[in-house]
Image (cartoon, helix red, strand yellow):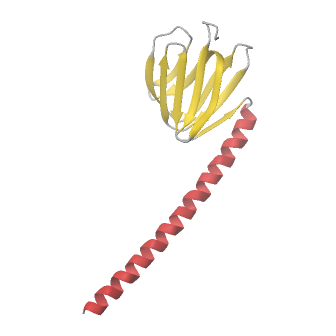
Amino acid sequence: MQDSGQITLIVNIPERIVLKDEHVVRLVTGTKAGSHGILPHRRDLVAPLAPGILTYEDDQGIEHYVALDEGILLKSGLAVQVTARRVVASDDLATLRDQLESALKTVSEHEAQTQRILEKFEDDFIRLYHEVHRDQA
């Protein structure tokens, strides 16, 4: 059973839960209105999150970091749930930076591949369109 002075933090992306920590004593994240700190017995809230780094401290006094894309934060009682499209978590800022750079490179490569596929579809569409209209003339 959880101590009443601790938050359960769940961070997820649409496909899965990325992180669950039941021993969070405080967290700070960036919302569209600015930086926002959350303690266990603060008022419940829902907030849109800006891209940035969520920082939280566990009951051992260790800080942890979660880089996230735009998302939403829901605090209800002693539970905080964060949902974002992309998330990278680490206990070390240097490691977080490396993981984030790697993730962004993968996204860039995927976007480039998607762009090449779309260009091929466009070329094929134009070619077929001209063939159909040429045959009708």
- Residue farthest along the front direction in this orientation: 1
Q: Which residue corresponds to the image point at 67% horizontal and 34% vertical from the top-left?
A: 89
Is residue 15 toward the left or the right of residue 137 in the image?
right
Where residue 4 appears, as percent x and y from the top left, is: 60, 6
Residue 127 is drawn in which quadrant?
A: bottom left
Q: Is residue 29 above or below residue 124?
A: above
Q: Furthest residue to the left?
A: 137
Q: Quadrant of the N terminus?
A: top right
Residue occupying the point 61% across, 58% down: 109
Q: Could you say which is closer to the camera, residue 104 or residue 9? A: 9
Instruction: Count the marks.
Output: 0
Question: Residue 68 location in percent, x, y?
Answer: 57, 36
Q: Position of residue 16 (x, y in %)?
A: 58, 38
Residue at the image point whose x is 44% and y is 18% from the top? 45
Residue 86 in the image: above or below residue 28: below
- The relative height of residue 38 versus residue 134 in the rendered view (above or below) is above
Which image quarter holds the C terminus?
bottom left
The structure residue drawn at horizontal position 52% and vertical position 33%, both measured from the top left corner, is 83
Judging depth in this view, the residue of 1 and 7 nearest the camera is: 1
Residue 7, image x, y percentages: 59, 15
- In the picture, measured across the screen, residue 117 lies left or right of residue 98, that is left
